[in-house]
Amino acid sequence: MNRILVVEDEPRIASFVGKGLRANGFTPTVVGDGPTGYDYAMTGEFDLVVLDINLPGMDGFEVLRRLRRAGNAIPVIILTARTSTSDTVAGLEGGADDYMPKPFRFEELLARVRLRLRADRAEESTVLAHGDLVLDLRSRRAEVAGRSVDLSAREFTLAETFLRNPGHVLSREQLLSHVWGYDFEPGSNVVDVYVRYLRRKLGAERIETVRGMGYRLTDHG
Ligand code: CA
């Protein structure tokens, strides 16, 4: 629940939002025009969109309309250039979940992003499963082939990150930002250490090393 698409054509704002999100443990992708924003939002690779209104190619209202028309329910926070309520009303009527009038402080945007992700997550299933590996997010319990396995808080979050991205190669950097945020020493091998712990508990074949790239959850137990 960390992948944020930022559609903003003004480099200064795009960079400000992108850096701020990254520093808070999110994985932002920034694009600068409406059609690219629409295409990216439709990939299913993102958990939330921060969408500017005045954009080249297609404005934010149109991007939003097309997303909703296509049945895409991804949470969208629009950035409105004016404090005038007309953009805001149009945005909310067009299917935006929230809005952020410019100029804004980063903390204000961050609060809205977190709120939206939490609201979205509350409707999500609390059990993640991959093959015979099951994580119950509410009770924080893990099971392998019906047998309960004790995981530390970090191990659980690491396992959860793998189960949310089955088959994807996750780089050390991605895992660090998802699981440890900024609470780690630079150049630390903490990811490798914890992957080793998880392999010991869940089965060595379950997490594959992809040389030079990172780690991937496999179908083998
Ligand atoms: Ca703009």
Image: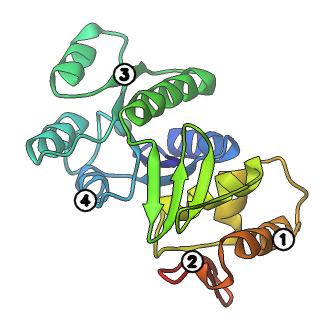
Q: Which residue is mark 3?
A: 99
Q: Provide the secondary structure element on which disc 3 rests.
A: strand
User: Does residue 107 show up?
Assistant: yes
Q: Which residue is mark 1?
A: 193
Q: Provide the secondary structure element on which disc 1 rests.
A: helix
x, y percent for residue 132 = 48, 69
Q: Amino acid at mark 3?
A: Tyr
Farthest left residue?
A: 69
Q: Amino acid at mark 1?
A: Val
x, y percent for residue 80 = 35, 23
Which residue is painted at 21% across and 14% down in the image?
A: 89
Tag 2: Cα neighbours inside 10 Å, few (<14), some, or many (≥20)? many
Disc 1 versus disc 4: nearer the observer: 1
If you read the primary sequence from the N terminus, does the residue marked by circle 3 or circle 1 appear first? 3
Marks 1 and 4 sit apart, C-alpha to C-alpha, by 37 Å
x, y percent for residue 213 = 64, 82
Q: Amino acid at mark 4?
A: Asp
x, y percent for residue 110 = 57, 29
Q: Which residue is mark 4?
A: 39
Farthest front residue?
A: 147
In front of the other: 135 or 187: 135
Residue 111, above or below 154: above
If you read the primary sequence from the N terminus, does the residue marked by circle 3 or circle 4 appear first? 4
Q: Which residue is mark 2?
A: 216
Q: Provide the secondary structure element on which disc 4 rests.
A: helix
Lateral position of residue 206 relative to residue 113, left or right? right
Residue 111, above or below 21: above
Lateral position of residue 164 relative to residue 82, left or right? right
Disc 3 versus disc 1: nearer the observer: 1
